[in-house]
Image (tube, helix red, strand yellow):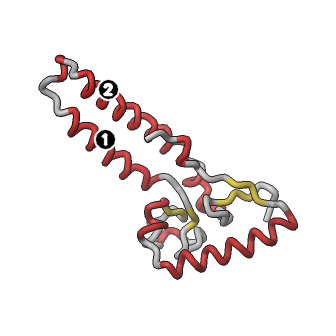
Amino acid sequence: MSHDTFTDCLGFPVPELALPYWNRADEVKAVLRQLSKLKGWAAELHERKDPLYVEVNLSFIRVELGNIYQNLKGALPFAVCTDCQGQQPENCELCRGRGVISQFRWEHALPPEDRDTRQGQIKKLQQATLENKTMSPSCPSYATIAE
C-alpha cells in the first residue's frame, strides 16, 4: 500500500478502479445540500402560510424533496463493494459497475455474513496499519449534509 491509500467509511482501502466514483462524493453532497435548502424553504413557507403559495401543496413538496434526497443518497459512496472488491466492477450486480456501494446498500442489500467478513478484513488491515500508518481515512461524511 502506498502512503496515499484512501479508505472507505469502514476503513477498507478504495481500489484504483473505484476512485473515480469515490472522488465524486462532493458532487453528490452538493446536490443533497441544495435539496436540503429547498426542503427548508418549503417548510418555512408552509409555516408562514404565505398567501402567494396558497395553491401549492407545500407539504407534498417537502415529502417529495425528502424522497428525492433519500434516493440520491444512493449515489454517495460508503464502502468498497463486497462482491467484486472494487477490482472488477464492470459485471458486478451489487455495485453496478462502480466498485463502491452506498450506505443503504451496505445496510440493507448485504447478507450479515458479508458485512462480518468485511469487518474481519478491516480489523486485520487496521492492525497492520497501526504498525505502518499508511492509510488515510477518506469517508465522504454524511454529517456535512444537513437534511
- Among the 4 quarters of the image, the one containing residue 31: top left
Quadrant where the C terminus sits is top left
Tag 1: amino acid: Leu
Residue occupying the point 86% across, 64% down:
132
| Residue 24, horizontal then vertical, whole percent | 55, 47
Q: How many marks?
A: 2
Pointer 2 local density, CA inside 10 Å: few below 14, some 14–19, many at least 20:
few
Quarter holding the N terminus is bottom right
Residue marked by disc 2 = 44
> Could you say where residue 58 lies in the image, as x and y percent from the top left?
22, 32
Name the residue carrying label 1.
Answer: 65
Which percent across, then down, holds residue 13? 68, 64
The residue most toward the front is: 47
Q: Is residue 65 above or below residue 121?
A: above
In the image shown, does 46 or 111 lie closer to the viewer? 46
Corner quadrant of residue 65: top left
Q: Is residue 70 left or right of residue 15?
A: left
Q: Amino acid at mark 2?
A: Glu
Label 2 or label 1, whichever lies nearer to me, is 2
Closer to us: 6 or 96? 6
Identify the secondary structure beneath mark 2. helix
Mark nearer the N terminus (2 vs 1): 2
Tell me if residue 146 comes above or below residue 14 in the rendering.
above
**Residue sitting at 70 percent across and 55 percent down?**
137
In the image, residue 57 sits, relative to residue 91, either above or below, namely: above
Tag 2 and tag 1, C-beta contact below 8 Å: no
Residue 25 at x, y percent in the picture: 54, 47
